[in-house]
Amino acid sequence: MITKETILNYLEEVFDPEVPVLTIQDLGIVRDVIIHSDQKVEVVITPTYSGCPAMNTISTNIKFELIGRGIQQVIVTEVLSPAWTTDWMTETGKQKLKEYGIAPPQYTTKNNPSETEVVVPCPQCNSTHTQLLSQFGSTSCKALYKCMDCLEPFDYFKCH
Amino acid sequence: MINYILHLADNALIYGHRLSEWCGHGPILEVDMALSNIALDNIGAARSLYQYAATIEGNGKTEDSYPYQRDVREFKNVLLVEMPNGDFADTIARSLFFDAYQFLFYTALQKSSDKQLASIAEKSLKEVTYHLRFSKEWTIRMGDGTEESKQKIQHAINELWSYTGEMFDASDVEKQMIETGIAPDIASLKPMWEQIISDTLEEATLSFPIQMQGAWFQKGGKTGVHTEYMGFLLAEMQYLQKSYPGLEW
């Protein structure tokens, strides 16, 4: 008998292709797991950004992982509402991001201050003396910053 | 209903496609990445809308049927988004006008009686907020920049102005959707849009094209009557599917 918990455990092995230290659960994109009466497993995910090219890969990886674990029928469905937010990212996820060299979201969407007041500590040296270079980084979810103390440029996972 | 969804999808796709033409050609790396990111968000929104249209229409349609297998007259995007990129100022002026529109439009569409459209709006609004910030900032930076940048952005604003009226001028399809509560009343968004534009231009020390107020506006895109640029755009965008029909990755 497959349970929702088992499936959620299996999904701990599915990583984000763009930020490979994060599991899809760290990112908060797994919204639900439904075990249908015919034992078909449905994984409900939500895209981070509309055009995120990682979504197709994630969906394929979920199927690979579950089929590899012996689940016969897997379907992955996407929901758009409520829209994904970095508020759903786990604390472990944020910690892993920082260790990977990407500054994790510093605020929740409820208390995100205006752009000029945002303070993003450098993931390398922890200095808060940093500067926004561009609101758009190497992927949709990141902004580009630089540290004025250690002079390293770095990515910030935008509070979204 | 389907024609309305396709109109929204075409707006996002053609705008996204134009911006994607900057990929690899941006004036600086950060701008190149920003424009490509904005293009991606718009193409993503277009995909959600085309997928929705395909589900409603059935008949073997997929999200790819609409972008690749229709001809110019079947596209219902506003003329503004098919305008060529021109120089960087032309692109930013077009973006300012359209991002401000999309911002207000998606805000209102969140209240649509159609659940799927409301969720696409909710998702896209978060992204458009970044886009609008970007196009506002660059308008201000150019207006408040050198003599040359100021002259270029002012010129672009004036040139594209006559393409802005169409956004707020409801087509028959839109009128029907507005009546049923599926679409927001776009005409009512115009004063708020003008406010965003005039506040931005003021901060940019630019002048609002006041002489154009009440002037005649270009229109036609919403009914499939496009500018000559549209055919060239489609020729490039549809090249692969026209040469190798049905080709898949």
Image: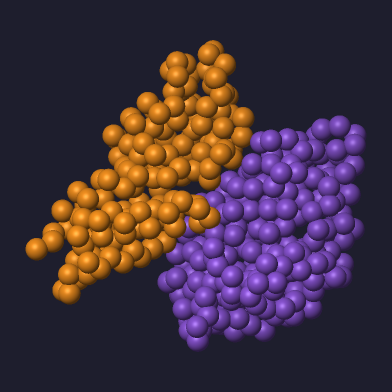
Chain colours: A orange, B purple
* Frontmost residue, A98 versus B218: A98
Please identify the residue farthest to the bottom as the structure is shown: B59
Where residue B12 sits, quadrant-wise, is bottom right
Left or right: residue A40 versus residue B78 is left
Query: Outermost residue, top direction?
Result: A149
Most extreme residue toward the left is: A1
Q: Position of residue A81 (x, y in %)?
A: 40, 61
Q: Indicate the position of residue B119 as horizontal and vertical percent values.
A: 45, 64
Above or below, A22 relative to B181: above
Tell me where residue B192 appears, x and y as whole percent.
Answer: 66, 58
Q: Is residue B129 above or below residue B225?
A: above
Residue at 62 percent of width and 30 percent of height: A133
Residue A133 drawn above or below residue A90: above
Most foreground residue, A12 or B88: A12
Count of numbered badges drawn on the protein: 0
Residue name at image x 80 percent, y 34 percent: B144
On the question of residue A112 being in view, the answer is no
Residue A3 seen in render: yes
- Please indicate whether residue B229 sits to the left or right of residue B13 in the image: right
Q: Quadrant of residue B84?
A: bottom right
Q: Nearer the viewer, residue B183 or B207?
A: B183
- The residue drawn where x is 21% and y is 62% is A71
- The quarter in which the C terminus of chain B is drawn is bottom right
User: Which one is nearer the viewer's eye here, A98 or B183?
Assistant: A98
Seen at 56% across and 32% down, the residue is A144
The answer to whether A40 appears left or right of A21 in the picture is: left
User: In the picture, which quadrant includes the N terminus of chain B?
Assistant: bottom right
Give the image location of residue B247, x and y in percent.
59, 70
As drawn, is B144 to the left or to the right of B151? left
